[in-house]
Image (spheres, rainbow, N blue to C red):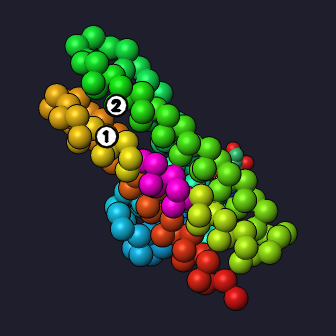
Amino acid sequence: MEALSSKFLLIFFSFSFMIHSIQATETNTLFIRNSCSSTTYPRLCYASLVKHADSIQTNRMLLTSTALNVTLASAKSTSAFMSTLSRSRGVKPGEVAAMKDCVEVLSDSVDELRRSIGEMSRLRTSNFELTISDVQTWVSAALTDESTCTDGFQEINAQDNIQTLVRGKIVQVAQLTSNALALINKLATSHG
Ligand SMILES: *[C@@H]1O[C@H](CO)[C@@H](O)[C@H](O)[C@H]1NC(C)=O
C-alpha cells in the first residue's frame, strides 16, 4: 500500500512537472510568434528562432541577440557556399567574378554583424541609445552589402540555375538580416 501510494505520488509529480514545462514552452513560442509578427518575413523569423525558444524564454534582448547570431551563421555559411560555387565546373568567368564580389561583400556583412553582436552584449552596461543606434547602423550596412551581391548577379545575366541557387541563398540572408533589424528597431523603441 505504502509502495503503491509513493508510486502514485511520483507519477503525479512527474505529470505536473510535464504540464508546467509544456506551458512554459507554449509561452516562449508564443512570445517568439508575437515578436516576429512585426517583422517583414514573420514565418522565416519564427522558423529561425523557435529552436532557441528555451534559451530566449520571453526576453526581448535575448530574442534580438539570437536573431543576430542566426543571421551571422547564415551569412557565414552563404559566403562559404559562394566561395565553393565559384570554383565549380561550368561556371562562366563573369559569374565567377560576380561570386567573388559577393564573397567580398558578404565578408563585410559578416564583420558588421559581428560588431553588432559585440555591441549588443554591451547594451546593458553602456549608454543604451548610443549603443543601439550603432547596432542599427551596422545591421543596415550589412543589409546594403547583401543587396549589392544580388544586384551584381542581375546585371551579368547569369545562367538560370546559378541565378536561382545564388538568389535563394542571398535572399535568405537578406531576409534574416531585415528581420533582425526590425527586432532591433523594436527593442530601441520599447526601451524607456
Ligand atoms: C551569440 O553569440 C555569441 C558569440 O558566439 C555568444 O557569446 C552569445 O551567447 C550568443 N547569444 C545568444 C543569445 O545566443
- Can residue 108 be seen here? The reply is yes
Q: Secondary structure at mark 1?
A: helix
Q: Which residue is mark 2?
A: 98
Q: How many marks?
A: 2
Q: Secondary structure at mark 2?
A: helix
Tell me: 60 left or right of 123: left
Which residue sits at x=33%, y=48%? 171
- Asked whether 177 falls inside the magenta stretch, the response is no
Q: What's drawn in magenta, residue-wise?
A: 139-146
Q: Does 35 sit left or right of 151 as displayed?
A: right
Q: Residue furthest top?
A: 89
Classify the position of the N terminus by image quarter: bottom right
Q: Of the residues shown, which amino acid type is indicated by label 2?
A: Ala
Residue with the most extreme left position: 160
Task: Please give the label number shown on residue 152.
Answer: 1
Quadrant location, the C terminus: bottom right
Cβ–Cβ under 8 Å for marks 2 and 1 = yes
